[in-house]
Image (cartoon, rainbow, N blue to C red):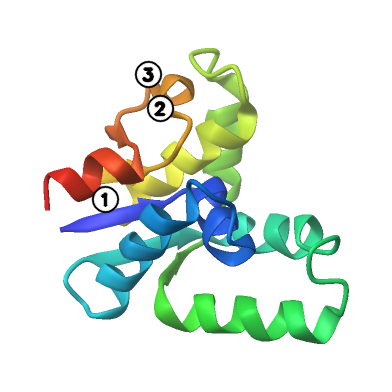
Amino acid sequence: MKILIDTNVLLDYLSGREPFATDSTEVIRLCSTEQFDGYVAVHSILNLFFILRKSIPDANQRREKLTELSELFKLVSIDSDMIRHSLKNNDFKDFEDCVQAECAVKAGADCIITRNIKDFEKSPVKAISPEDFLKGV
């Protein structure tokens, strides 16, 4: 099964944000043991580098953490067609979520693991919370 991990789940994992970190960590572990094919959108790495600057002020430490993630997951790049399609897609309130959905389609993902299920109601790839995903495993 192929799963695309949304930025918020990665942030929960990297920051240890409870009560979400436990489930996020388990999803990451399942990908690391190759029980699932894990995918991450390239722009998630970019966003995380910026977001993590408060909890991990040292840029080299952030680079190390994100390097580990980039080696654990298959990275899904975005291209100009995906951006143009996302810009024209009014089904998503959040542009970044639309791009995440585009990446899930490109990866052939079976689902998107996110805590923002409602933001993906119109996604062509089903969104599921880490908690609900783990219940089905």
Does the image show residue 114? yes
The local secondary structure at tag 2 comes to helix
Whether the residues at callouts 2 and 3 have beta carbons within 8 Å, the answer is yes
Tell which residue pokes out farthest to the front in this image: 19
Give the position of the N terminus as an image quadrant.
bottom left
Tell which residue pokes out farthest to the top in this image: 90
Callout 2 crowding tier (Cα within 10 Å): few <14, some 14–19, many ≥20 = some
The local secondary structure at tag 3 comes to loop
* Residue that label 3 marks: 121
- Amino acid residing under circle 2: Ile
Front-most of residues 25 and 59: 25
Which residue sits at x=62%, y=25%? 94
Horizontal relation, residue 132 to residue 82: left or right: left
Of circles 1 and 3, the one toward us is: 3
Which residue sits at x=46%, y=60%? 40
* Residue that label 2 marks: 117
